[in-house]
Amino acid sequence: MGFSYFPHTDEDIREMLKKIGAGSLDDLYSDVPEEFIFKGEFDLPEPMSEMEVRRKFSGMAGRNRSLTVFCGCGAYDHYSPAVIQYLISRSEFQTAYTPYQAEVSQGTLRYIFEYQSMITMLTGLDCSNASMYDGATAAAEAMMMALACTKKKSRVLLSSTLLPQVLEVVGTYARYHGIDIGHVQMSDGVTSLEDLQRQLAADDVAGVLVPSLNRYGIIENLEGFADAVHAHKGLLMTYSDPSALAVIRTPGEWGADIACGDCQSLGMPLSAGGPYAGYLACRQDYVRKMPGRIVGETVDRDGRRSYVLTLQAREQHIRREKATSNICSNQSLMALYATIYLSLLGRDGLRQVNALSYGGAHYLYDRLLSTGLFSPVFDKPFLKEFVLDTVIPAERLQQHLCDNGFFAALATDDGHVSFCVTEKRTREEIDSLVDCISNMA
Amino acid sequence: MKNYDKLIFELSVEGRTGFSLPDNRWEHRLPEIPEVLCRRSESGLPQVSEPDVVRHYTNLSSMNFGVDTGFYPLGSCTMKYNPKINEETASLPGFTSVHPLQPEETMQGTLQVCHELEKALCAVTGMAAFTLCPFAGAHGELTGLMIMRQYHMSRNDMKRTKVIVPDSAHGTNPASAAVCGLRVVQVRSTPDGTIDVEDLKPLLDDTVAGIMMTNPNTLGLFETEISRIADLVHGCGGLLYYDGANMNPLLGKVRPGDMGFDIMHLNLHKTFSTPHGGGGPGSGPVGVSAALWDYLPYPKVTADGDGKYHLMSGSHTAGRVSGFMGNFSVMVKALTYIMMLGNKNIRMAGPLAALNANYVKESLKDCYRLPIDRVCKHEFVFDGLADTSSGITALEIAKRLLDYGFHAPTIYFPLLFHQAIMIEPTETESKDTLDAFIEAMRNIAREAVSEPDILHDAPHGTPVRRSDETLAATRPVLRYRQVE
Amino acid sequence: MAKVNEGLYYSETHEWVRMVDGYALVGITDYAQHALGNIVYVDMPDVDDEVSADEEFGAVESVKAASDLISPVTGTVTETNEALENTPGLLNTDPYGAWIVKVRLAEDGLPGNLMDAAAYADFCANL
């Protein structure tokens, strides 16, 4: 019996082999040394029917515990409107390749142009690329871009208040690329401008990456940062949650040159860490050093508006080892996800998402403090995420919450516990989380 | 809605709404945030209704060509059919609702998928272990090279900073090497397109970190000297990196691990049928030999004896290369595909891909110039038309194919030929489709002589026609601006 | 056949040098602009940057290619051709008129191994 993905009949194979002048399919591998032809059994199961596959995967999905999420730390449980999954499932979007043939790729090219436009609107910067793999790798690319934009500098400073996974990924890239990384100290939950100024003095810093919403959920005040960095001819880069940029001061308004972050907060499913999409935006002056694909508007030969991949001379397929980056693909379909999300939510919806998250997070914060089991760590404004100290051993606390259906109170590596509330969390859910904790004591 | 030509911003009308969110009944309100921390300008995001959004993006989708639309013989990209059951398993809520930082014991199903996929990839490649963290092929290359460097560095062999790359390689190879801090040295191809072993020998010394190879190479030709190359490179202390971009014809037939490769990456979006998504998300797992297990990036999924899965890190790990654990839902799709194929059908995937490529090659080589006439694997390269008198270029041939309802092949790559036309049919195309494509290519060869203008001006029937790329790059317009 | 102008010095990487009032104007040759196709961007150094013979000092980009600019001379950039910022296509239409940088030469800043017009024409004919 045939297999549903292979259309060949025995007769087809016979005729095609005849055209080729081969006696068998094995003949097509006659140039492969005999010892490399695999003759054993693959350690794989027998072929499954669709029904069996469905059963197997439903079983595995069922082994995951369904938890009510009260944690962020770089992945946020925001609501995803029904329209998005429906639209991105269209196979004209899903099964297309990179839009190299502009004439038959206007769908992809236009949504990327819209995506780029929306990222510039959120960040307040001039240009965006077509998206990166995720926020952490976008930060690594931003670091390499800063180096390419500033001549003869080899050092990049990272704020200690960045998410740990961002620090780690950037650190990995830096170690192999040969970039000297320095860390700017934290002072009362935020990046220390004083320490930054001290480290800038040597004039060897190409760029400085600071978060606008940091690992503690605090909204950082970046007043004076751009001036300090620019005075030493470096670039200011921010790591910013794009959802929050509807309400908090934008990278452009802080005077940043490059902004990066993760579009996951724009309603993308948590999905154990991916696919998400990183974003990267910059001021006009630096666009020719920006890695990744970029879509531009032009006209076709009939004078109609059309869109093409542009500024390609920056990219690896032309510059090879001289390219700023090796990045080839983007996360196109996830960029479409973000674009549709932002189209639906629009100006007012994204504000509302933040208002609901803010209200819920502050309600939870107050309620946790009122139990007497928690104490504040920092006295700084936060948006939807915060850390507290607790008298309950963190591991026991998290375990107890998991057993009761909550993912909350994630222990941070510096000894606090982290909470996050999005618009998806109801007052009832928050109350039962707090009750669950109170019952422990 | 033919000739639809709007951007979402042009549909925006003050007062329209595309969302439905609960009312704000919280006591704490945004204005509590100190003003210095607040956004000052309007975002300018559109205000559109839900039906507007649905119709807009549906119209955009109709301007696209995908594998589900028609034949997509794009060389080097393996545009095979993307099974729909993959989408269904990947969107199971039990998978999509998992937070990446959840405790291991609450995400055993997710970790099981990772572990089973890793085992399956080991089975078909002959490698000992895989990391699933890399997001794409180029990211896999970079990760693999980091592992290579980490291996040398942890042995205190600091001078190994040279990586050898064939002149026919994908551009990502030298670019990944440079990002990884390695120096790129090119090795030449012989006239028949494989690595020139004599040119390789003098490059081999104690500064070589390794060699990056694609096998079959970018011309679709098997590197028959692979054993000698492996011995030579290993002999000087270097490692062999296998670029899995061209793994498809070997699927079920030949395993890179058996050929002596130490590190490799796979593109799940090529060989393992996950959709390309207009440029991503993909997934680029990296496999290593047993000796390199400890250098894999973290987090790494492991299984203990009693069916429990854990996340851990090797003691010499190359580090973290992704925010969390990679493009998980792409992994679900790839594992679904492998389970559908099973140990039996997977043996047919590579050979049928090779059959389709050789069939198209043999059916067209009288009217297109075939620079290297030998058995190919998953793809092959023509160097323009056999009859060059018309002066018709690869670009014009590619654009004309769009009028015939086919996607264009890859053109002007590899760089070894001036009019390269690189064709990869994949195993999921029927003989009927291939025959129709062959007919179209033969027609185009005839048109080149009889009506060259139809090629100069092609395509004619697409949503837009050839675009002014010089204008786009000279005066870049990279975002929407409202007309003042 | 690419055009070659008398009175200029030429490098093997297809840059030309014209000496004017003791300063060196540097551009790319007709051969180079033909090979690149429509030029869309010129990446130029800043004024006061030092350039060295045989070293990279910028790049020219066309739609589908990019090429580093290799300095034929050693010295200090005193001026860059601002017209190229908005009209990089001048390098295609007027390769010997559209200079890219003006350089104040260092001592021995003009290497002796640069070609004259006849030698460069021969060089191109043999490529």
Image: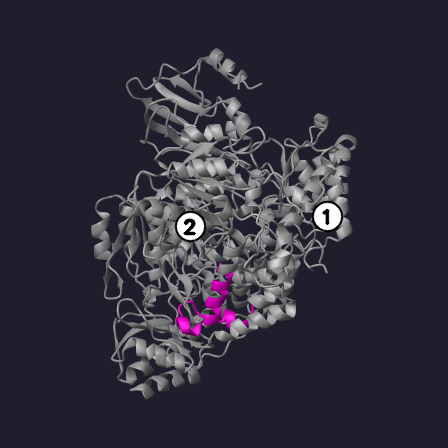
Task: State which quadrant residue B236 falls in.
Answer: top left
Both marks 2 and 1 on one chain = yes
Q: Position of residue B396 (x, y in %)?
A: 68, 36
Task: State which quadrant residue A70 falls in.
Answer: bottom left
Which numbered dot is residue B144? Answer: none
How was this image coloured? one colour
Q: Residue furthest top?
A: C118
Query: Is residue A421 in the magenta section?
Result: no
Closer to the camera in the image, A334 or B127: B127
Q: Position of residue B11 (x, y in %)?
A: 60, 61
The residue lying at 67 percent from left, 49 percent from top is B352
Residues drawn in magenta: B91-118
> Considering the numbered disc 1 on the image, is that residue within a helix, a strand or a loop?
loop
In the image, residue A378 sits, relative to residue A309, either above or below, namely below
The crowding category of the residue bearing disc 1, from other C-alpha atoms within 10 Å (few below 14, some 14 to 19, many at least 20), is: some
What is the magenta segment's predominant secondary structure?
helix
Identify the residue under disc 1. B405
In the rendered view, does B481 fall on the left or right side of A262? right
Q: Are marks 2 and 1 in contact (CB under 8 Å)?
A: no
In the image, residue C34 sits, relative to residue A43, either above or below, namely above
Reading the chain from its start, which is encountered first: label 2 or label 1? 2
Q: Position of residue A88 (x, y in %)?
A: 59, 62
Q: Which quarter of the figure is the N terminus of chain B placed in?
A: bottom right
In the image, residue C67 sits, relative to residue C4, either above or below, namely below
In the rendered view, does A255 fall on the left or right side of B98? left
Identify the residue under disc 2. B143
